[in-house]
Amino acid sequence: MSDRPAVISGRNLSCLFGSGKKKFHAVKRVSFDIHDQEIISIVGESGSGKTTLARMILLLQPISEGTLLINNQHPLHPKKHWQYVQAVFQDPFASFNQFFTIKNQLLSAFKLKESKIDQKDKQARIEAALLQVNMSPEKILEKYPFELSGGQMQRLLIARIFLIRPRILIADEPTSMVDACSRATILDMLLDLKRKLHMTIIFITHDIGLAYYVSDRIFVMRNGSIVEQGGPNQVILHPAHSYTQRLLQDIPVLNRAWLQN
């Protein structure tokens, strides 16, 4: 158990879709605490509820039942909430307007800031953020999203996080739509972001190997419920729930051997 304070707490959180006989729980009475500067991975197959839970934490999905607390308080107005909680999504192209330049879209990040920032300072901060993700400002700022690769777009999302500087970051399958060469780079940048900004990170992933590599704790979700949670060695090397055991069986033999070394 961490001695750091809980920055996110959920108590009996539920999300219901549909109505009448077609009503079903996408998330069903989930309770958890996530502590300051902790890295949590939420693991599960498609339809397990992990992305819905992430959207609830972001206030993008209404909470049907239960209580969500951020720093022991109910979430504030969405704009204030998004100063504190941000996300890097699976599809970076969906996060940017294809008809505006990268410069204009990075400038829009400052709308979440409460204090006034002059144009010269904004430009300096944008250039610094791009350099943090190994991108050249003069080559990128006047381009449009459709002119860039998926890996470049994910790096731009991370640059945007450097501008907003939230305390909590939700990374929803951030490496699933980029090539193999870009995956390690994106992951290393996210971990570097965590170290520099002292953030709490929630990884949403179906990749147990990734969860084992990056996490302080792992939550395993199935059918909208957290069926197992604990440290990486406990959950991955000594799984207690049959669903976790089944997920591990889907890992290729060589990767399973790597996990145990």
Image (cartoon, grey):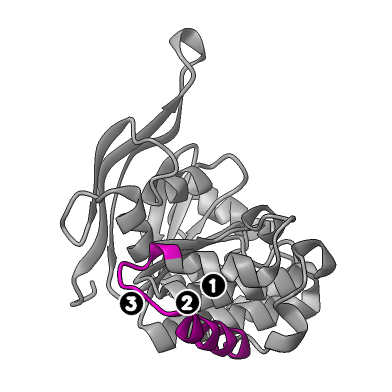
- Label 3 crowd bin: few (<14), some (14–19), many (20+), radius 10 Å: many
Mark 1 burial class by Cα count in 10 Å: few <14, some 14-19, many 20+:
many
Q: Position of residue 260 (x, y in %)?
A: 58, 79
What percent of the width, then of the height, locates residue 228? 40, 54
> Measuring 67% from the left and 89% from the top, which residue is drawn there?
134
Question: How many numbered circles are shown?
Answer: 3
Callout 2 secondary element: helix
155 left or right of 39 in image? right
Judging depth in this view, the residue of 14 and 85 nearest the camera is 85
Is residue 238 at least partly visible in the picture?
no
User: Is tag 2's residue or tag 3's residue first in the polypeptide sequence?
Assistant: 3
Asked if the residues shown at circle 2 and circle 1 are in contact, with their CB atoms under 8 angstroms apart, the answer is yes
Alpha-carbon distance for marks 2 and 3?
A: 19 Å
Examine the structure image and report whether residue 114 is included in the region drawn in magenta.
yes
Q: Quick check: 36 above or below 222?
A: below
Please tell me the numbered disc located at residue 99.
none
Residue at image mark 3: 37
Q: Secondary structure at mark 3?
A: loop
Residue furthest out toward the right: 147
Which residue is farthest front? Answer: 119
Magenta residues, start to end: 111-132
- What is the three-letter code of the residue carrying label 1? Arg
Q: Is residue 55 above or below residue 20?
A: below
47 and 59: which one is in front?
59
Query: Would you name the residue on which mark 2 appears?
Result: 163
Q: Specify whether 89 is left or right of 170.
A: right
Amino acid type, callout 2: Leu
Image point 67% across, 83% down: which residue? 185
Q: Nearer the viewer, mark 2 or mark 3?
A: 2
- Say which element carries label 1: helix
The numbered mark, 3 or 1, whose residue comes first in the sequence reads 3
